[in-house]
Image (cartoon, rainbow, N blue to C red):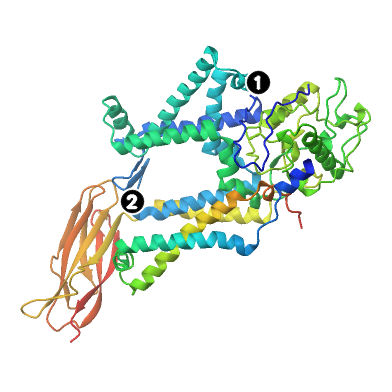
Amino acid sequence: MSKEIPVEVISENSLYKSEGKVYPREVNGRFTRLRNLAVFALLGIYYFFPWLRWDGRQAVLFDLPARKFYIFGFNFWPQDFIFLALLLILAGLSLFFFTALAGRLWCGYACPQTVWTEVYVWMERWFEGDRPKQMKLDAAPWNKDKILRKGGKYLTWGFFSLWTGFTFVGFFTPITDLGARLISLSWGGWETFWVLFYSLATWGNAGVLREQVCKYMCPYARFQSAMFDRNTLIISYDPARGEPRGPRKRGLGSVLERARGLLSNEAANAAVIKAAHENAAGNAKVHARATTALAVDTLDDSSAPVVRSNEDLGDCIDCTICVQVCPVGIDIRNGLQYECIACGACIDACDEVMDKMGYPRGLVRYTTQNAVDHKGTKVLRPRIIVYGLLLTAIFVGWMWGVMHRQEFIIDVLRDRNALYRTLDDGDIENSYTVKLINKLPKAAKYSITLIDAEGISLVEAPLEVSTSPEEVVNLSITLHAEAGTIKGRRDVILRVQNLDAEGTSRDHKTSFFAPVQ
Amino acid sequence: MSDMQVVQNDPPPRPMVQRLGAILWPSFFAAAVANAVFFAHIDPLVLREMTFPDLPLTRELGYTLGFFAFWACTASSSWFTWILLRPTCRFNQPLPPEH
């Protein structure tokens, strides 16, 4: 059962050595099914949404040239940028909330990096087979079989990448039109560039870099531990039950059914350190790197239990399948590590082995540090409550804000060239440019009136403006005052009223200037 | 070997001044250059007209705000780089004990 994992030794200190490839072994089980479900749901959204229609236009379209975003029934203007900013804050807060509660759910199930990597790994397996076959193929000299397998993989990756890039651009320029123009090869320069760029980035991230993005480029991986405490749901190996690890003959029961029982926390940790040391000293296997929480915690392994007979063994049979299935190439038995993306592959792998051995499942499982240390787990902690309340408040505020957005925008700019203009008869005039934006996808009629301005009148009065759907109208208006009635600066208010909807009006304050003397 | 590995993988943290300097100084320089190039083409008073035409903002204030905005961006980037370059053992610490 215990087979050496053939791995290349990589010193952490050699800066110029490239990372050894991780060949994740195929695994089946509860969490794999959950992850597959997430892949289909999320990529389904990505590849399918641009093709949906809504009111005769693309349902989800980020029309950058027109500076408008359409998301189903909603349309957003640059002036609605605050909602995007709030949405990002909301996303950040949810990340905090879910991380504190249940660890790195984002990394394991939802991050585009994980999701696309998963799909690229599937495609790799179709052509090259599972882990051992892939390793053998990479080591083998180039022959017809290798060329066909690699060629097939790269061809599939290439097609999938291009489709991904095409879909990406399809969110910004109508996708049906983009598809139609592909046939006649009449894409614009920037459309072509972004399709190719996004394809290349997808291939690079999901096909080549993979776990290195998580380990060396991801900011979240670096700061997520700040949200962790001993009550956070993590994926952990149970050293008290598993140690001392080792192969054994069939027939030995689980420690849960034997007299030995569970180890103390101290003995269990020492046993893990001892196992890591033995691996490092013996053949310097990379999966036993001493970069783990436990090894840093205490390097003393003197209290590790000694194995005199099979009866002393724990439930871990040291089959290393949990290491082989790991997409980031770590050994979960070394404790919580920042490299772990919490995908749950090791849980499924270990459960399968436990089933074969006739041991209870859960040697590697979703748990909390407190539970591993045989203490009680507390779900409702202050940070959970604070994150939860903040999240709810901002979410409700955001929803309310989106539902109650202003239907039109009014902006008044004074004439930049002259403060005022004196007419022949001594009367004073000021010029303004009024920018009126009808944000709604339907025509509207507005009236502009001057209020609260004694002695000043609107030359164009009565002023009514008709706008087509989503039209931006620029109007020149003039305010007029009789000679000598106004001196210096006077605030005036322009009221814009939507004549189609009773009660929708907005005031805009601006200034009227006249000579001081 | 294993113990050697641990020692090598866990270099002592650099002094605070060195860390702050490595983050703040390059970003300060980059912000100064970006600020100079940006305001060589754009008048802060034009920006005022577009945003808060009623506030008495001067050119000097515009340049200052612009500089600190640029510095905030470049320093964030330097800070992020520093986080990514920290040794992994800084992150693989045991969870803090409960109080």
Q: Nearer the viewer, residue A499 or B90?
A: B90
Taking the spot 35% from the left edge, 60% from the top edge, the residue there is: B37
Q: Is residue B93 above or below residue B21?
A: above
**Which part of the image, by quadrant, shows the N terminus of chain B?**
top right
Say if labels 2 and 1 share a chain. Answer: yes
Residue with the mark numbered 2: A77
Label for residue A315? none
Q: In this view, does A471 lie above or below A150?
A: below
Q: Which of A402 and A65 is in front in this view?
A: A65
Q: For residue A273, what is the image quadrant?
A: top right
**Which part of the image, by quadrant, shows the C terminus of chain B?**
bottom right
Residue A87 x, y percent position in the rendering: 47, 50
Residue A323 x, y percent position in the rendering: 70, 31
Name the amino acid, label 1: Pro
Q: For residue A166, what is the image quadrant?
A: top left
Question: Circle 1 sits in a helix, a strand or a loop, which is it?
Answer: helix
Q: Which of A350 and A469 is in front in this view?
A: A350
Residue B32 x, y percent position in the rendering: 42, 63
Assess disc 1: are there few (<14), some (14-19) or many (≥20) residues with their C-alpha within 10 Å of its C-alpha.
some
Q: Residue furthest bottom?
A: A517
Q: Is residue A442 above or below residue A477?
A: above
Name the amino acid, label 2: Trp
Please report whichever mark, 2 or 1, sits nearer to the chain's N-terminal start.
2
Label for residue A132? 1
Residue A400 x, y percent position in the rendering: 44, 53
Residue A54 seen in the current view: no
